[in-house]
Amino acid sequence: MDSRNPFCPPPLPPKLDYGAKELTRLLLEARTALGELNGFSFAVPNPLLLLTPSIIRESVESSRIENINTTVEQALQGYLFPEEERRSPDKEVLRYRDAILWGWEQLGQLPIGHRIICGIYGKLMPDYGGEYRKLPNAIQNTITGQVVYTPPPTDQIAGLMTAWERFQNTPPGEIDPLIKAILLHYQFEAIHPFADGNGRTGRIILVLSLVQDGFLKLPILYLSAFIKRNRSRYYELLSGVTENEAWLEWLSFLLQGIVEQARGTTGTLKRVLALYQKQRERIRALPGRIASLEVAEQLFLSPILSPVNLGRSLGVHYTTASRYLKSLEEAGILEHVEYGKYQLYVHRELIEVING
C-alpha cells in the first residue's frame, strides 16, 4: 500500500481457514487460560478487590505504549489529589481507568457499539468531545517523520464504523469469538476513527469484548503489558495485515498474547488474594473497630490512602480515620509518606504485587 494514499480496510470477516491447526491449538490454550483467570472473579466476596489492582496496572501499561510514563504508585497518589494538582501523565492514566470502568458498567445495558465506543473515548480524551475525527490524519515514524500509514478519509468513517459495529454484534457462526475480537481490533486500529487516542481506545474495547462474549466476568486482563513488551512486532503485524493481508500471523500473535497475559494475570491475582487473606488476619488481631472487614478491604480498593479518603469510604470522622491509619502503620501494614501537604499511607506489599 502507498502510505501517501488513504487506506480503506477490507470488510470483515476475511476468507481464512479458521480451522487451521495452529489457530485451533492457540484457541484452546487461550480459552483455558481465560477460564482460569475468570475463576478469580468468583474467588472473593467483593470482586472489586481484584478489579482495582488489575485496572490500575492495565491503565499504566496501556499509557506507556503511547509514551505516557508514570508508575502505579504515582498514579494512585494522583487519585487522591484534586484534578488541578495531578501530574499530566497521572491524569492520562486515571482517565484510562475511568474509561474502562465506565465501559464495563455500560455492558449491562448496551452492546459494544457507537455509544460505548464514543463514551469511552470521551472519558479518555475529554478535550476532543467524544466524536469521530473531522480532519484527515496520518501516522508518522516518530524518528524520521515519514508517513507510514494514512487511515480512511473522514467521510468514510461513519460507514466503516457502522459495519464494524454490525460485525461486532453479529453471532460469530464458524468464527470463534476470540478470533472475531482480534479481527475487530485490527479493523478498529485501521479505521483510526478518532483524532488521537485510538490505540488506548482500541485496547479497552478489546478487553471489554472478552467480557461481552463471556470469557471474563471482569475486565481484569493486563493485555497491554504483552503489547508493550512486543510493541515493534505488534505494529509490524498490523502493517502486515494492511499491506499483505497476513491475517494468520496477526491472529496467532494476539492469541499468544492472550495466553501469556491471562496466565500472568492469574499469577498476580493469586498473589493479591493471598496477600488479602494475610492482611485481613493481621487486621483482625488489632483492637477496636479497626479490626473490621471494611478496613481490610479498603487497603485493596485504595492501595494508597489518606485520612480524608479513608474517612469518606468508611463513614467515619477524619480523626478516627487518622487513628486507624496510624495503627496500621505501627502494625507494619502501611508505610507513611509525606507528599507536599498530604499525609499518605502506602500499602507497599500490594503495590509490589501489582508491579510484578
Image (cartoon, grey):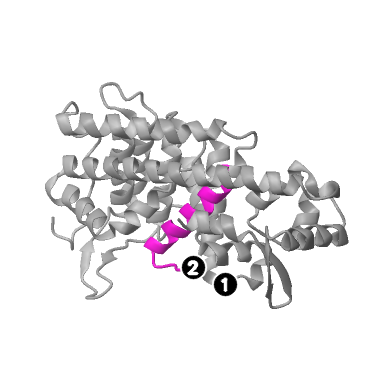
In this view of the protein, can residue 258 be seen by the observer? yes
Q: Residue farthest to the bottom?
A: 340
Secondary structure mostly taken by the magenta-highlighted segment of the chain: helix
In this view of the protein, can residue 133 be seen by the observer? no
Q: Specify the amino acid type for callout 2.
A: Thr
Q: Specify the amino acid type for callout 1.
A: Arg
- The picture places residue 272, in percent across and down from the top left corner, at 55, 46
Residue holding disc 1: 87
Image quadrant holding the C terminus, namely: bottom left
Left or right relative to 168: residue 145: left
Q: Is residue 94 above or below residue 159?
A: below
Asked whether 68 falls inside the magenta stretch, the response is yes
Q: Nearer the viewer, residue 116 or 218?
A: 218
Q: Is residue 228 above or below residue 117?
A: below
Residue at point 58% right, 57% down? 349
Q: Which residues are magenta?
A: 50-70
- The picture places residue 326, in percent across and down from the top left corner, at 78, 63
Residue holding disc 2: 70
User: Disc 1 versus disc 2: distance between alpha carbons?
Assistant: 9 Å
- Element carrying mark 2: loop
Image quadrant holding the N terminus, namely: bottom left
